[in-house]
Amino acid sequence: MSEASEMLDLVLLVDDDDTTNYLNKRLLNDMQVAKEIMVLSNGKEALDYLAQACNGSADSPFKCPDLIFLDIKMPVMDGFEFLEEYQKQGLDAGDHVIILMLTSSASFYDLERLKGFKKVKKHYSKALTNHDVKEILREFFKKRFKSE
């Protein structure tokens, strides 16, 4: 789909569902979307990672992701708790990271609640499809990926 120079550096999959993570990671790898795809199983793991990776320090061994796929319902820290803490810690200050929600059963209440988080650009049903990924790349990463 793309040349290595056009690939995203890092995509985070934040979900406690191993099957969904396997399917999404395989699809993203097959489509050559990113140089690296990292799987984290809850919002707390993701926050801990982002606090180290996206702190502006050039010498950090951690990469700040280009794209985060975030599940709503997870143990330890769910998607909403993650988003609240993400804002509280100021991790949403830069415009670099795109956050998309993944859900198997989005209730009207959940979708309304998502509107309160400006960093969440959209939500998708699990698991991602080839069509979803192409749409995401066209909509949010136009400069890196040419339309097909």
Image (cartoon, rainbow, N blue to C red):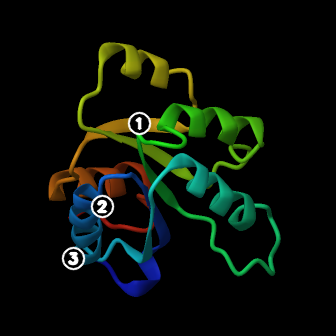
Instruction: Identify the element where label 3 is drawn.
Output: helix
Say if 40 sits above or below 83 in the image: below
Circles 2, 1 touching at the beta carbon (< 8 Å): no
Residue receiving disc 1: 72
Q: Residue furthest front?
A: 76
Instruction: Identify the element where label 1 is drawn.
Output: loop
Three-letter code, disc 1: Ile
Residue drawn at x 40%, y 85% is: 4
Q: Which mark is residue 57?
A: none
Residue drawn at x 46%, y 83% is: 5
Circles 3, 2 touching at the beta carbon (< 8 Å): no
Circles 1, 3 touching at the beta carbon (< 8 Å): no
Q: Give residue 33's position: percent from left, percent from top.
A: 34, 71
Which image quadrant for residue 102?
Answer: top left
Residue drawn at x 66%, y 75% is: 62
Q: Nearer the viewer, mark 1 or mark 3?
A: 1
Q: CA distance from mark 2 to mark 1?
A: 14 Å
Residue 23 is left or right of residue 66, and the answer is left
For the image shown, how many numbered marks are present on the structure? 3
Image quadrant occupied by the C terminus: bottom left
Say if 145 sits above or below 32 in the image: above
Q: Give residue 11's position: percent from left, percent from top.
A: 45, 65
Which image quadrant for residue 56?
Answer: bottom right
Q: Nearer the viewer, residue 32 or 11?
A: 11
Residue receiving disc 3: 30
Image quadrant occupied by the N terminus: bottom left
Residue 92 is left or right of residue 4, and the answer is right
Three-letter code, disc 2: Asn
Q: Give residue 135's position: percent from left, percent from top.
A: 27, 50
Residue receiving disc 2: 21
- Of callouts 3 and 2, the N-terminal one: 2
Q: CA distance from mark 3 to mark 2?
A: 14 Å
